[in-house]
Image (tube, helix red, strand yellow):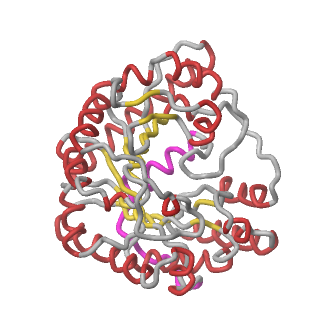
Amino acid sequence: MKLRVLKKALKVALANARQELAERIYISTGIDFTRPVQVYVIITERCTARCAMCHYWRIKNPQNELPAEVWIKALKELKEFAPGYHIQFTGGEPLLKEDILDILRWCGENGVSAGIVSNGELINEKLAAELVSAGLNNVNISIDSPVPEIHDELRGKPGIFRRAVEGIGYLRREAERQGHKLTISVKPTLHAKNVADMPKLVADAVEWGANVVNIQPLNINTEETNQMWINDIELLRNTVETLIAMKSEGYPIANSERQMRMWIKHFKREPIQRRTHCRVGMRLLAFRPDGSAHFCSPLRKIYGDIGTIKDQSIREIWQGEVARRIRKISVNCKLNCTASCYAERTLREKISFFFKMFLSSKPSVASTRHK
């Protein structure tokens, strides 16, 4: 199974190398050879948690969800149109979708690199075995604090910390039992209630069985997030310096030093200008539960969707008039999104992130100084 993962990683690497060239050609000439290499699917808006920083659980009438066969048809088209893409299933809580395993198994059986983002609550021994057997590349678990009571409060669910940590353990043991190279990433949201504890969370995550920590700074999405904004910039600065030191010591922090220093400007609400053209419209394709497609949430809020898999092929969506128009606009967007899925990365940072997410080794504690 490790060889299967390595083959998928090679496909992803080759697709991204081709894409790097296609993006440079598009920026300099306007000739469009681009293909989606990052695919995000909000597979359901339903969730088991009531997170303070999220709006999905507040939705009274979640979007209708497409069945597995419709998604699989779209994924087949994607494989033909953009071989080597990586797809991430998120939500809501993706493991609530009754046929999610059918979709994940199809990805594993057809050489498509796939991962999920989960709160970890539903991952028991049986489900961990099924997820690993499906051939997943990565499982991202949202844990916001090393303090159980704080995490449970933030996620609005008593006991969810314990179940998430247990889920990581089940996944790690099952991956080792099946001989499968699985990346387990702890993905916290950085805010005022955990900024002081973030170094300990990184250290604890390694002990739990994670081999990547990918930190995402808070954005204002709900009324509660206004109260979670980091105003103590000196505390934030100290945490950033500690995390940078931990990364240099060998802790598996996916964020680059440059990205972490950018958080200071983010929380000071200072404008962060891009150094280069925005590449989201040239490489990212996102879907909602009803099959509607867009490039990213900020562009969707302004310009709307670019198509839908319910009555269009992937090629028709990506190369359609609407997508081409919005892609042309997006290239000149100067807002430097600090959310990890949209973050501007240098070529060196892209390579480093690839190795972290696809070729990471077993977790190991580099030091006990930060516990």
The quarter of the image holding the C terminus is bottom right
Q: Tell me the magenta residue range.
A: 347-369
Residue 345 covered by magenta stretch: no
Name the quarter where the N terminus is drawn.
bottom left
For the point 29% across and 31% down, which residue is it? 79
Q: Nearer the viewer, residue 48 or 198?
A: 48
For the point 67% across and 68% down, the residue is: 224
Q: Position of residue 335 (x, y in %)?
A: 72, 40
Question: Is 184 positioned to the left or the right of 339 in the image?
Answer: left
x 35%, y 23%: residue:
312
Q: Residue 59 or 1: which is nearer the viewer? A: 59
Question: Where does the image place residue 318, in percent across and percent down from the top left?
Answer: 44, 24
The residue lying toward the viewer, choosing from 269 and 176, is: 269
Quarter-of-image position of residue 183: bottom left
- From the top left corner, tell me how far across and down residue 108 is, in percent: 21, 48
Relative to 194, 230 lies left or right? right
Vertical order, 58 against 165 (above or below): above
Q: Quadrant of residue 150?
A: bottom right
Name the quadrant containing residue 2.
bottom left
**Relative height, residue 239 to residue 97 (above, below):** below
> Which residue sits furthest front?
60
* Image coords of residue 64 (percent x, y): 36, 46
**Total numbered badges shown on the rendered structure:** 0
| Up-down relation of residue 264 to residue 151 (above or below) | above
Residue occupying the point 37% across, 44% down: 87
In the rendered view, would you say 76 is above or below 370?
above
> On the rendered structure, is 38 left or right of 3?
right
